[in-house]
Amino acid sequence: MSRENAIIIGSDHAALELKEKIKKFLLDKGVSVEDAGTHSPASVNYADYAKKVAGAVSRGEFPRGILLCGTGLGMSMAANRFSNVRAALCSDVFSVKMSRLHNDANILVLGGRILGDILAFELVQTWLDTEFEGGRHLDRIESLDRN
Ligand code: RB5
């Protein structure tokens, strides 16, 4: 699979169903998807899947990723520990749009126990369609990895 525009996606058990639906939504649109798991409803540690997805984005193996857990909180905490990762936990369209325009968010984090399917698809679509504005925001995001 060419990873140039592919999306790596991962979830824990609490958001498995929504992950599967988002995966289908993306595949139906012709977007390549790498599924990092989880693949069953058995209880797992969200951090293990955050590490797979955020690690791959951090190393530049995938340009973008999507992470889901029950609330999205654990996934966003875990993902944002990785350098070069800007994971945005969003549940509204405006925040998703701004996460791309101003923050160049390279991981979208969603809460499977928070969102309905239709809203989740709209958030994903908005995130895919919105480009980073650059300009003054570039210095700001570059400073994130400097202590
Ligand atoms: C799992 O029960 C739940 O804690 C997890 O999905 C997530 O919401 C953690 O932040």
Image (cartoon, rainbow, N blue to C red):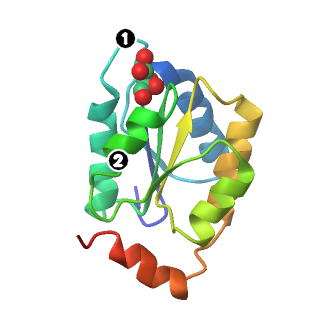
Q: Nearer the viewer, mark 2 or mark 1?
A: 2
**Which residue does the numbered mark 2 point to in the structure image?**
79
Secondary structure, mark 1, is loop
Instruction: Between residue 99 and residue 126, name the one nearer to us.
Output: 99
Query: Please, which residue is most extreme toward the front here?
Result: 147
The first of marks 2 and 1 along the sequence is 1
Q: Which mark is residue 21?
A: none
Instruction: Between residue 2 and residue 38, name the one nearer to us.
Output: 38
Q: Is the residue 21 above or below the residue 131 in the image?
A: above
Q: Residue at x 42, y 63 (%)?
A: 63
User: What amino acid type is highlighted by mark number 2?
Assistant: Ala
Residue 128: quarter of image: bottom right
Q: Quadrant of ligand 1?
A: top left
Q: Is the residue 58 above or below the residue 43 in the image?
A: below
Image location of residue 92, percent across then percent down: 71, 46
User: What amino acid type is highlighted by mark number 1?
Assistant: Ala
Q: Is residue 12 visible?
A: no
Image location of residue 16, percent across then percent down: 50, 23
**Which residue does the numbered mark 1 point to in the structure image?**
42
User: What is the quadrant of the N terminus in the image?
Assistant: bottom left
Secondary structure, mark 2, is helix
Query: Relative to residue 57, is residue 111 drawn left or right?
Result: right
